[in-house]
Each structure stands twice: as structure tokens, then as C-alpha cells.
Amino acid sequence: MNADIGVVFINKTAIIEAVDTFIKQTRVDWRRYHRIADRAAPKVFRAFNSATAKLSLSVSVNEVTRALELRDNVNALENANWEQFEQDIKDLPLTKPFFDGAEMAIDELIKDPQLSQLALEGVRKVSTAEGLEIKTAFTLRQFEAERFLAANQEFLASSIMIESKEAVRQVILNGFETGKAPRVMAREIKGMIGLNASQSQALINLETTLNTRQAKGLGWPPRKIGLKQTPLTDDRIDNLLTRSNKKMLRQRAEMLSRTESIRSANAGSQATWENAVSQGFLPSTVRKIWQSALDERTCPFCNSLHGTTVELKQSFSTSVENESGGIVTINEPHPPAHVLCRCSVSLEIDSPAPTTGSNLFVNAVTAAEILAGNREASEPL
């Protein structure tokens, strides 16, 4: 018994030491980005929900019904006020996380002995106000920040609008294929406004399943131990679909708010470092290094990128083979690599030749092993 306890104690100590070493070696801890996202995400979440609600209110069931009766897909699709929706997405409150990320990057330069020395060599500051003076020197020029943010927001708004329109298009196509009444289709379109294409398809599939079970006299949910089935009336089906719809909209808003807050914070750091190099405070040879969370939730993409270094203005790249044999490649200047990514970047000084990531590749078998290994390593002893 004592021997077993000793083994557990040693293992836990080793894990604590390993984590402590990792954190010390990571100049920008990814958790700091998430603290920024924690503060920013609720505002983004509320703004996206507001934009989606306005978009839904702009849809006229009567006008969409008339368009569908004429099989006029274009007018049925364009009935919503997409222009206002796109503008609302462009106005998502991501300016503050961008500047918070820039501030974090400046703090890194000041607190890291090697980086701060390089910066001080550029400005020859010897007073006790060195930190403040360096911060002033590294402050992003407002028009550069605004230009970056405008471009990023425009791309984000365009992507979200395209996804949302595709979701409506799927509802229309499915309705014609299954012979739904135009008014029923119009109400579905109004209800699904704001979902992306995969969510829309999932809701269509759920509706098909519920209708099939109702026709067979089966209840819901499918019989499982401890769950009591409820008869599937028309009202019950409508209620289930409405609840699922609201849940999917909430999930989309949450994913967007978290992912884009992380993106904005990382972009602020990237812009600060580039500005520091352009002003001569840092040498052009500094590189950035990808830092992954390395836990049970770390995906094969981020697992393979961890520790990869590239030149400051280069992008990180890696490929992963999925189970069907297809190759998925990412090419990003900084995290996130995907929705809900938790990675960050930090600076590397006097590192060996950069590993650009262009040769990084993870096949489906290795990807599964990575995930299994991450889960096993994170299990409590």
C-alpha cells in the first residue's frame, strides 16, 4: 500500500514539475489570451445575438410565402435584411481584445530580459521609467490598428453572411424536395435565420426523424434506461425543434464570441511585434513560436504545430489526414487554427533554423493516437 502511494506521489510531483517547466518556458501563456477572451466574449455574444434577432425580425413570412409559391428562390432567400446583418457583424466589439493582446505583447517585451535588452539597445533608455517609455514607443499607431481591424471584421462578416445564407438555401431546397407547404417553409426560414449550413441540416434531419417516429407511433426520446418517452404530437415536435433551434443559435454565438476574441488578442500581439521590428526596437531575425495547450482537448492540428517556429511575417502551416483519406491543411499567421482553438504565439530569440510547418503532416492513425495520448496523460492519478 505504501509503495503504491509513493508511486502516485512521485508521478504527481513529476507532472507538476513538467507543467511548471512548460509554463516557465512559455513567455506568453495561452491562458492569458483566454483571460482576455473571458472579458471580451460576453459583449461579442450579446452583439451577435442582437444581430441575429434583427435579421430574423426583418423576414416577412407572407412575402417569403408568396415567393416560394412562385418558386422564386432568389426573392425567398434575399427577403431578409442581409446588408444590415453584415454591418452588425462588422461592428462586433473586438477592438478592445485586439489592444489587450497588444498590451500583453508589450508586457512580454518589457519583462523578458533578452527581449527588453534588445528593445533598450534601440532606444538607449537607462532611467527608472524604462518600462513606460518602451510602452510608449511600442504603442500601435491608431490608423494601422483600425485598418487591420476593419479588414478582419469585413472578412468575418462576409464569411458569416455566406454561411447563414447557405443555411436558408438548404431549408428551401429541402422544402421543395419533401413537398412542404410554402408557408411552413417560410416559418422555418424565419426560425433558422442565423444558423450555419451544418446546423440547418442537423435541424432538418431532426425534423425528419421526429416525423418518421410520429408516423410509426413511436415516442421521444429514443428508449433509453431511465428516460421516459413522450408521445410525439405535432405540438411536441414543434417544441422540440424550437428548443433545438435556440440551442444551436446559442452554440453558434458562443463559438463565434470565444474564437474571434482569441483571434483578436493574438492579432494584437502580432501587430505589436511587427511594429517593434519596423521601428528598430527588435531585430528582423526574431521568430514567433506556436504554443499549444497540450491537454486532452488539444487537436492533432495544434498538437503538430506546438513548438513550430516561423519568421515574424510568415504563416504556420500543417496538414492532417481525416478518416476518409482527405487532407485538411491550415495556413494561419497566428491562432486560432480552428473554432474554439486555445493556442497562442510567443517570440523566439536566436532560435535554430525555423521549422515553417510546411512539411508537418499528421495522418489519421497518428491523429487518433495523439488524442488518445492526450486524454490518457490528463487522467487523474
Image (cartoon, rainbow, N blue to C red):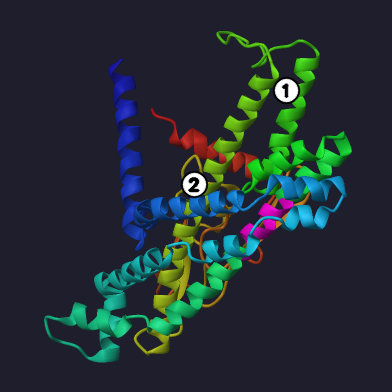
Q: Residues within 10 Å of mark 2 (few under 14, many from 20)?
A: some
Instruction: Out of 249 and 16, give the one closest to the viewer.
Output: 249
Judging depth in this view, the residue of 41 and 10 nearest the camera is 41
Which residue type does callout 1 highlight?
Answer: Leu
Q: Which mark is residue 28?
A: none
* Image-based side of 381 in relation to 259, left or right: left
Quarter placement of the N terminus: top left
| Residue 352 percent location from the top left of the image | 49, 73
Identity, as a three-letter code, of the amino acid under mark 2: Glu
Asked if residue 161 is among those painted magenta in the image, a careful observer would answer yes
Marking on residue 254: 2
Residue 168 covered by magenta stretch: no
Task: Please determine whether, in this image, residue 313 is positioned above or below residue 125.
Answer: above
Q: Is residue 152 above or below residue 189?
A: below
Q: Quadrant of residue 318?
A: bottom right
Relative to 139, 199 lies left or right: right
Residue receiving disc 1: 210
Q: Quote the CA–CA distance across marks 2 and 1.
A: 27 Å
- Determine the residue positioned at 55% across, 74% down: 151
Q: x and y percent of residue 326 in the render?
A: 77, 51
Magenta segment: 158-166
Q: Along the polypeptide, which appears first: circle 2 or circle 1?
A: 1
> In the figure, residue 229 lies in which quadrant?
top right
User: Residue at the location (87% across, 49% down)?
Assistant: 71
At 86% from the left and 34% from the top, the residue drawn is: 178
Residue 378 locus on image (x, y percent): 44, 36
Image x and y of residue 290, in percent: 48, 62
As rendered, which of 226 and 166 lies closer to the eye? 166
Q: Is residue 323 visible?
A: yes
Is residue 311 in view?
Answer: no
Of helix, strand and loop, which mostly describes the magenta segment?
A: helix
* Residue found at the very far left of the displayed protein: 128
